[in-house]
Amino acid sequence: MPLPVPPTELVPSERAVVLLSCVLSALGSGLLMATHALWPDLRSQARRLLLFLSLADLLSAASYFYGVLQDFKDSSWDCVLQGALSTFANTSSFFWTVAIALYLYLSIVRTAHGSETGRLLWAFHVISWGVPLAITVAAVALKKIGYDASDVSVGWCWINLEAEDRVLWMLLTGKLWELLAYVTLPVLYLLIRKHIHRAHEELSEYRPILSEAHQLQRRTSVANKKLVLIPLIFICLRVWSTVRFILTLCGSPVVRMPVLVVLHGIGNTFQGGANCIMFVFCTRVVRTRLLSLCCCCCSPQPPEAPAPSKRGESQRPRRTPNELPST
């Protein structure tokens, strides 16, 4: 019988930080979905894809929260259930993140539109939900999901470290898609940025006669920054998980270093919060509407004007609705 795997102990402060990250990610995903529901005119195709990514991130944050809160010690039934949910949601999040980048590339660079984007959306649904579901069902059926001693997680369950083919299943249930995303996202976003920059240069000779030249230049600058930040933030969040995965395969004791454990916990659970910062708080039109909504909810209602006396009414000429002053 194999010896029990020595666990990576989580101190209360580390657990509190990761739990807070889960809560913030869930709130961020919820806010993204709320903006989609509140303002129909903002429901572009790209933001629809972002809605599905937010759903995956919300499920991921909820399952991680339960896992960190429980801090499993063996492969119990709820450990397997939590591991299956987080595996499905996390893998789906990878696929939707790449799907958004691919959609933007095809729409902006290849100018795909109409029926092409409709078929593309169906393909994204089949792949981004179907492939993670098939992998997760197979992993559960073959009893590959279970207690992992927090060496490749932070309190939650994933692939059982005592499984003989655990490396293969770690790759299939997340790491392979994570590594592919490290390459795919920067390439796609750099190609989009290069295309926008080239189009901006072609219009530069007409800029003196354009009335909205300054506004166009500012919007292009903001878009360029976002196209650099999106893959950069994704890599900065996810790289700690990859580092601990490699250290676990090498059998290095550094995998239990508290800083690495906390960074891994935040990186895996905060994707929804990062998307909210990028696509709500750093998107001017959404931010402005959100602030206006908050101000309307917080500001007191003005008191109603007293009804005029009958004497006053008789002395003033009555106005028709067309003559009333506009607000």
Image (cartoon, rainbow, N blue to C red):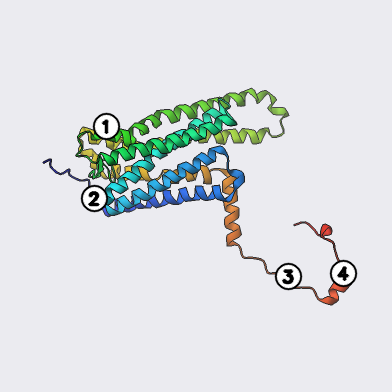
* SS at circle 2: loop
**Which quadrant does the C terminus fall into?**
bottom right
Give the labeled residue for mark 2.
76
Point out which mark residue 168 bears: 1
Disc 4/disc 3 C-alpha distance (Å)? 17 Å
Separation of residues labelled 2 and 3 (CA atoms): 66 Å
Q: Mark 3 points at which residue?
A: 305
Q: Earlier in the sequence, mark 2 or mark 4?
A: 2
Tell me residue 289's x, y (percent): 60, 50
Which of the two discs, 1 and 2, labels the residue nearer the N terminus?
Answer: 2
Q: Is residue 19 visible?
A: yes
Q: Position of residue 140 (x, y in %)?
A: 28, 42
Q: Which sits in the foreground, 227 or 149?
A: 149
Q: Is residue 232 visible?
A: no
Mark 3 closeness class: few <14, some 14–19, many ≥20 residues within 10 Å: few
Tell me the residue that label 4 is attached to.
316
The image quadrant where one finds the N terminus is: top left
The amino acid on which the numbered mark 2 sits, given as a three-letter code, is Ser
Q: Which amino acid does label 1 sit on?
A: Leu
Marked residue nearer the N-terminal end (4 or 3): 3
Foreground mark, 1 or 3, reads 1
Q: Are marks 1 and 3 in contact (CB under 8 Å)?
A: no
* Residue situated in front as seen by the camera: 288 or 45: 45
